[in-house]
Amino acid sequence: MVFIAFLFASLSFIYELMIAQIMAFFTADLFVWCVLIGGVFLGSMGLGIIWSERSPARSLPIASFVFLNCFQALIGGISVIALYVTFQLTVIFGSQNYFLASGIPLFLVAFWETVLIGFWAGEGLFLLTDMGQRGGISSAWIRIIYYLGIFAAGVSFVLVPYISSLQIALAAGWASALLALYSSWGLRDEKDIRPVILSTVLVIVFGVLLWQASAIEMFFLQKHYSPVKSESSWKDFFVSQGPQASLRRYSASRQQVDFVRFPSGGEEELGQLIRAYHLKEAPNSQQVQNWGLFINGALWLSSAFEDFYFETFAHVPVAALGISPKNVLILGGGDGLLAREILKLSSVKRIDVVDDKAMMEVFGKEPLLRTLNRGSLKDPRVRVVGADTYDFIRRDRKVYDAIYLEFLDPLDYDSSKLFSQEFLSAVKARLAPQGFIVMAAAGFFQENGDSSSDDRVVLSRTFLFGTLEASGFETVVPFFSRLEKDNPAALVVMRKIAGEEKGLAEDMLSTHVGNLRAGFLLVVPRGDIVLKKDFLSPGTLHVLNEDRYRLSLDPAVHLSPSMDGVNTIFSPQLPRPGSWWKIRSPY
């Protein structure tokens, strides 16, 4: 009985964790969905306990518990598949159906699964307590074991980072069916064999599904990353809509890393558009075209456009300050692309690249990145350190001329600490007297919405500037990977796509260029710096030139004078997305 209570509680909580994780993957807000799903689960547990006190199931506790485990296996085991299916239908038909596009069906499925699993978890606790008392085991002891099972599920969930959510859910469903089958032996003296048959069937079904888990997951991943037709039918969910994306998935530190190669058919115009903005043909372009790197479902870099981003990130601050750094630190950046750019500076003698060890292992396995970064992480001037960046900067005692912070936008407490006063103060302590830091800050700016100036952007997360000021920095210079909109070659391509409608090509080009703009922050401890207007190229750049350098420093940004927000590890200003219910698309 003790073993049954422990395992039942563990499996119930694993289902709840799976639902929260998948919803966070689809909406990019782990904090909100853990709170919502956890609250619904606990509330439903309470309802299940209340119901059991009046339920006729008390007269047949063993049979009721077996059926309850079968229900848990059925709903919990396929919970992830159900969410994948609903999400994919939302993507395919969202443009045709506002109800689907709103995400409400996806949310209803997630909450309904959680309600049922939580309700049965509460009912199961009551039945286990009742059966335990009949067997001479105190209700207090059963409850202790039950909650220890929940604790064990949480710990195991953290300690098993290399199994996908779908595999965990199917394995839990199979285990619930086995638990039902094991419990049904308590009915062997009774003539009703339906619980035995039902649990046996579920053991076989989930065994087969678990065996095919990798194929099932690949089917949904290809659906997730493959282009969607503007006009789709129900059969498009089951059959290919065209060439399928090929991909490789890695797991690291509870993060899913996907390297995706998109179908190349019908994208000649896009290739022409990219070439229109390249000053020279990028090396190995045929080997790396159409690839994207996604972290937890969000696009991190595209092989077609990565130099638009990394050339600006690396070279604009060096040119603006007129400094020739010798020792450089990159926190994040385990993909090696930023190191590739900084190695182009003749003054650089040493680069330390520090990133999460598990992520570094993933990046090291991927041949695509070795092609893109041109072996930068194997350069003798580069030292690679697999470590937590927060711990590293607080322990490190070296002094650097430049420190680059290449982090994902903060979405939870853990990532928020990389933008905290404690962390940034430690970064400042590692700077040489004339040193500077550069931060990737794409998610900290948004469009102004002022129709008179569609280039203007505004600060959307004010606490960052207050935190920088509290950390001892005096000067903050935003800059952007901004391209010109009057590129004649690009306009020719857009006119082919847009047709004869007047002004449409110009509007499309403006939108496209705007989508390629990413924001950065040049941060300096001292004040009264003078930015240099002339750009001295290292000579091997493919996108950045003097005109685009000046565009990148265009002061078309509004900084709020209010510096009242300071992010600390003790009082984090959670930078959650404004719309936690917004469904995330990979594009």
Image (cartoon, rainbow, N blue to C red):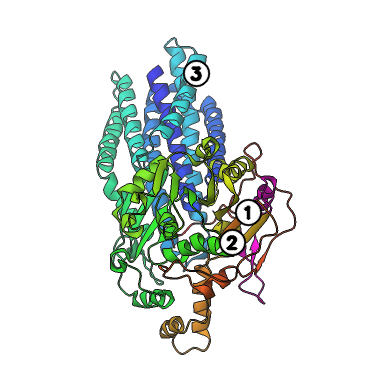
Q: Position of residue 291 (x, y in %)?
A: 35, 62
Q: In the rendering, at what x and y percent does residue 365 appear?
A: 30, 48
Q: CA distance from mark 3 to mark 2?
A: 63 Å
Which residue is painted at 64% across and 41% down in the image? 568
Crowding around mark 3 (Cα neighbors within 10 Å: few <14, some 14 to 19, many 20+) is few
Q: Callout 2: helix, strand or loop?
A: helix
Residue range in magenta is 445-474
According to the image, label 3 marks what residue?
144
Asked whether disc 3 touches disc 2, contact meaning CB atoms under 8 Å apart, the reply is no
The kind of residue on which mark 1 rests is Val
Looking at marks 1 and 2 on the same chain, the residue that comes earlier in the sequence is marked by 2
Disc 1: which residue: 524
Amino acid type, label 2: Leu
**Which residue is disc 2 drawn over?**
321
C-beta proximity under 8 Å, tags 1 and 2 = yes
Q: Residues within 10 Å of mark 1 (few under 14, many from 20)?
A: many
